[in-house]
Image (cartoon, helix red, strand yellow):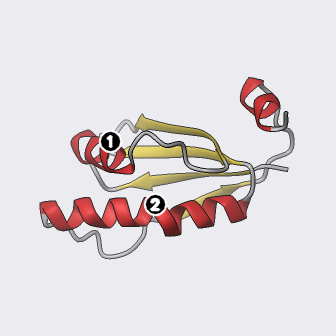
Amino acid sequence: MVYAYTQDVPIKEDVYRRIVERLGTEPLHGSLLHLCVRRPDGGLRYIDVWESEEDCARAFEERVHPAVHGVFREIGFDPGAEPGVDHLEVLDATGSLLSRATT
């Protein structure tokens, strides 16, 4: 079964775009879906679906955290700690992204 979570992050869209640019165009191994949406208060929320929790952890260690920390150093931003993650209990997962991942 897939691994999914939401995470509210204390950054604005311009910082998010810099992080995405630093990640490059190579897809993150095991990532099935990443949505970045604006919350009503102006902050951002990530909604992520991964093939496995292990793929997610590896991608964060190898690519996501280096990209985020690099941008934060450039702009002089220290959020203090990693924002909390709300793990989602996946009861069912269907759709074209999933069917492509299993073929």
* Residue type for callout 2: Arg
Distance CA(mark 2)–CA(mark 1) = 28 Å
Front-most of 79 and 99?
99
Q: Secondary structure at mark 1?
A: loop
Ranked by sequence position, the earlier of labels 2 and 1 is 1
* Residue type for callout 1: Asp
Residue drawn at the location 33% of the way across and 45% of the way down: 43
Residue drawn at the location 82% of the way across and 29% of the way down: 99
**Residue 95, labelled with which disc?**
none
Crowd class of label 2 (few under 14; some 14 to 19; many from 20; radius 10 Å): some
Horizontal side of 43 relative to 14 (left or right) equals: right
- Which of the 4 image quarters holds residue 70? bottom left
Front-most of 66 and 13?
66
Residue drawn at the location 78% of the way across and 53% of the way down: 89
Is there CB contact under 8 Å for labels 2 and 1? no
Q: Secondary structure at mark 2?
A: helix
Q: Position of residue 41 (x, y in %)?
A: 32, 41
Q: Position of residue 95 (x, y in %)?
A: 78, 26
Residue drawn at the location 14% of the way across and 60% of the way down: 75
Q: Residue furthest bottom?
A: 80
Q: Position of residue 31 (x, y in %)?
A: 63, 46
Front-most of 11 and 62?
62
Horizontal side of 87 relative to 26 (left or right) equals: right
Q: Residue furthest top?
A: 96
Q: Residue furthest front?
A: 26
Q: Where is mark 1, residue-wise?
A: 41
**Residue 63, labelled with which disc?**
2
Placement of the C terminus among the 4 image quadrants = top right
